[in-house]
Image: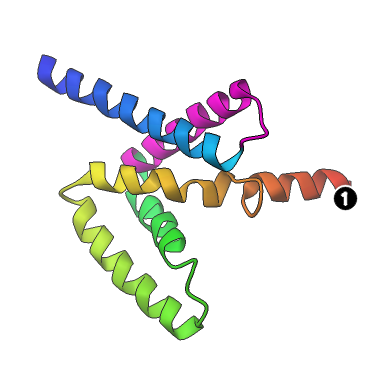
């Protein structure tokens, strides 16, 4: 039991460190407190999604992986291939999906294209 708790604590530490590094690289003009709070919120979002809705985490990761592709038919084909592969992998290695979720969660919570951008647009319009 102790070994399992040590593994979970180290995994959360590594994931939160990677999230903070990713947010620091992506948002260098924001304050450290803002980046830390955003990292904590994203960590909670990733872990809750991995525990309760791993299919949602797979879909976010597929969106992130196919973002650079411009042609729609190729994007759909690669999305299906990535989705099936990540769905199979998530049954055995959920940790890998959580690590990939670090990079894909910014698609949802990011300033440029994510939920926070839509929230800011809604506030400006109201």
Dot 1 crowding, Cα within 10 Å, few <14, some 14–19, many 20+: few
Residue 86: quarter of image: bottom left
Position of 5 with respect to 80 (left or right) is left
Q: Position of residue 55 (x, y in %)?
A: 35, 54
Residue name at image x 52 percent, y 78 percent: 70
Residue name at image x 26 percent, y 59 percent: 87
Residue name at image x 50 percent, y 30 percent: 39
Residue that label 1 marks: 125
Q: Position of residue 54 (x, y in %)?
A: 33, 49
Does residue 1 appear in this view? no
Which residue ends up furthest to the right in the rendered image?
126
Residue name at image x 43 percent, y 32 percent: 43
Quadrant into which the N terminus falls: top left
Q: Is residue 87 above or below residue 123?
A: below
Q: Is residue 121 magenta?
A: no
Judge by depth and name the residue closer to the eye, 21 or 90: 21
Q: Is residue 33 above or below residue 11?
A: above
**Magenta-colored segment: predominant secondary structure:** helix
Q: Position of residue 74 (x, y in %)?
A: 42, 82
Mark 1 falls on what kind of element?
Answer: helix
State the colouring used for the structure image.
rainbow
Q: Position of residue 72 (x, y in %)?
A: 50, 82
* Total labels drawn: 1
Residue numbers of the magenta segment: 28-51
Position of 95 with respect to 106 (left or right) is left
Q: Is residue 32 magenta?
A: yes
């Amino acid at each position: 039991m102790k070994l399992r708790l040590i593994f979970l604590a180290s995994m959360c530490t590594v994931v939160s460190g990677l999230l903070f590094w990713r947010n620091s690289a992506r948002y260098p003009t924001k304050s450290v407190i803002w980046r830390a709070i955003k990292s904590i919120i994203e960590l909670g979002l990733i872990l809750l999604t991995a525990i309760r809705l791993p299919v949602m985490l797979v879909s976010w990761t597929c969106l992130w992986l196919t973002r650079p592709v411009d042609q729609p038919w190729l994007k759909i084909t690669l999305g299906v291939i990535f989705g099936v592969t990540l769905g199979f992998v998530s049954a055995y290695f959920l940790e890998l999906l959580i690590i990939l979720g670090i990079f894909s969660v910014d698609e949802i919570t990011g300033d440029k294209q994510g939920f926070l951008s839509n929230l800011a647009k809604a506030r400006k319009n109201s």
